[in-house]
Amino acid sequence: MDVIRINSANDEFQVIESLKCNRVKRAKNHEIFIEGIESIKQALIAKIDISRIIVSDIDGVSDWAKAVIKSNHKHSRIIELDSDLYKKLCDRTDPSEMIITARIESNELANIQLSKAPFILLVDRPGDAGNLGSIIRTANSFDVDAFFIIGHSVDIYDPKVIRASVGSIFHTEIIQIKSMNEIGKYIKVEKERSGIKIIGTDSAGSVSLNDEAINRPIMLIIGNEAKGISVALKNMCDKIIRIPISGKANSLNVAAAAGIFMWEIYKNKRIAADAQGI
């Protein structure tokens, strides 16, 4: 097994560092940077194409890490970094024993396959990596069929998004919607195919979640943290629903609100399935 040992910030190190820090480089190279053992485990389960396995002490890693290296060394670069360079790549004060980079391809809207009664989540201009990763994690937990993002947003493959999703991003069908025109046409077609309802979420929505059962087929639209849902998307909605809250806060964190809505849809699906004996 060939091991590339790097003791200075050479070209290879700079490529790895750019995959961590630069969304343009990630998009150009079709490669991403993954830190955190659970995220790496989920990438492996999803059979993501691993391009590099990076460690700081190849002889001192765990048996699990040695097994990962052994099973991937024929098609992945195995890199041992100087300890200081390795720490420079890691965000954690106590770095995990392994980092990987992986090859990825973008998903296309035309290729998506949906069930007869789909649950689509559309997030409008997400600006916070932690929130986006948390929403992706929840979507994967509650059987969301497809995850759409529209407008200028944080990069879905920002390492902070991946880490916040705890690797759920690798099991989630994520589509970057190119324009309002594209999503408008898609909604029209999907309404004819499945009878999907378009539900917007807003703290000032005219309908309370207490008074509305939200069920598949559905497209749930979550707004930007500061600006909410755009006017163009609101005009596509059948209803705008709010979560009733008490206390002094006038709204919920967007990831928390998204989780409540997704749970309601998931719960209602299970209730319907139990009623039918499925």
Image (cartoon, rainbow, N blue to C red):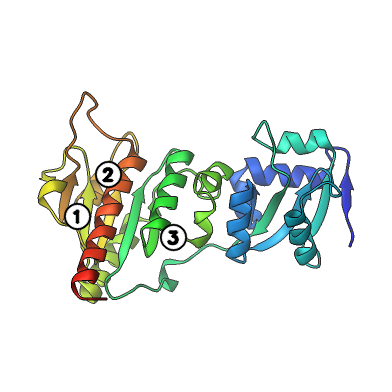
Give whichever of 230, 147 is nearer the camera: 147
Q: Residues within 10 Å of mark 2 (few under 14, many from 20)?
A: many
Q: Amino acid at mark 1?
A: Cys
Label 3 – label 2 distance at C-alpha? 18 Å
Location of residue 224 by image quarter: top left
Q: Is 68 placed above or below 38 here?
A: below
**For residue 237, which numbered disc appears in the image?**
1
Q: Earlier in the sequence, mark 3 or mark 2?
A: 3
Give coordinates of residue 18: x percent, y percent: 69, 43
**Residue drawn where x is 51% and y is 45% of the image:** 161
Horizontal relation, residue 231 to residue 14: left or right: left
**Residue drawn where x is 46% and y is 66% of the image:** 108
**For residue 175, which numbered disc appears in the image?**
3
Q: Earlier in the sequence, mark 2 or mark 1?
A: 2
Q: Amino acid at mark 2?
A: Ile
Location of residue 267 by image quarter: bottom left
Give whichever of 190, 85 is nearer the camera: 85
